[in-house]
Image (spheres, helix red, strand yellow):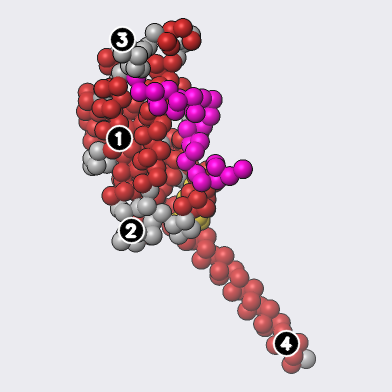
Amino acid sequence: MVRSGCAAADNRRMTEENLNHKEKKAKSDAEQRRRIREEYEKLTVTEQPKKQMKAAKSNTNISSPSKHGKVDAECVESFIEQLKAKVKSEVDYSDFQILEEDLKKDLKTVGNFRVPLRLAPIANRIKDGFDDITSGSSQSDCAAEPTYILFCAAIKEMDDLKLDQVNETKLLLWRDAINNALNLQFNVDFAIKHLCKIACAYFGFKVMEGKSGVEMLKLKNVDGNMEVPEDCLRDAEHFSGKPLSTGLFPSDFLP
């Protein structure tokens, strides 16, 4: 009887501990979602005027087909320089539709961070391909998390979109999300390199769009050189019909 009573007491204690653990986890998840929502709302309220000014300034400075009506080597070089520039990032959650839609929903742990469910697969691919990209940062996980989420959102969009679905403004947004991570010493040099490849492909695509083989030959100038760098045309062919994340992850090169 004594043993039976002890066993019953132990079972009650274990049940209570399990319930307490579940309750604590639920509270932790709720607190995490609340903190991310507060961060999002704060950024939305305080940064929206800055974002509008940034967009207007970016659109003024972009050397692009939409501004000049043509693409040439100088145009491409100028835009690539903009992508590589270490400008102050003003990107925020409201720039990404997936974050606006998912921040109030369930989160999933990937590495040291809690991310929206739809970002979890891309966050896992980043972790599997490049290990912990935040290992070189001096920021705490809590402080680094918003930047990590923005970076994952940018890579997620690359994975979702193709060349005919982007423009210069979108490429600059991705640059800002990547720069944000670089400014916190995230190990994401691979991302800015890939973004430059996407940009080169984008301009190659704009040149090739709607042109026949004969018309492509006419793009050569009197010296026999292409008016737009040939690597832009090659990159455009590389991404043709494929997600813009193609070639970003080491697993893309496995047989």
Mark number, residue 137 = 2
- Residue 4: x and y in percent read 76, 87
The answer to whether residue 222 is seen in the rendering is yes
Label 1 sits on a secondary structure element that is helix
Which amino acid type is shown beneath numbered disc 1?
A: Leu
> Which of the two discs, 2 and 1, labels the residue nearer the N terminus?
1
Give the answer, above or below, for where 239 lies relative to 5: above
- Residue 251: x and y in percent read 55, 45
Closest to the camera, between mark 2 and mark 1, is 1
Closest to the camera, between mark 4 and mark 3, is 3
- Residue 6: x and y in percent read 70, 88
Residue receiving disc 4:
5
- Locate the N terminus by quadrant: bottom right
- Asked if the stretch drawn in magenta spans residue 153, the answer is no
Which amino acid type is shown beneath numbered disc 4?
A: Gly
Total label count? 4
Label 4, label 3: how many angstroms apart (C-alpha)?
A: 97 Å
Label 2, label 4: how many angstroms apart (C-alpha)?
A: 54 Å
Q: Give, as a single range, the part of the protein colored magenta.
A: 228-255
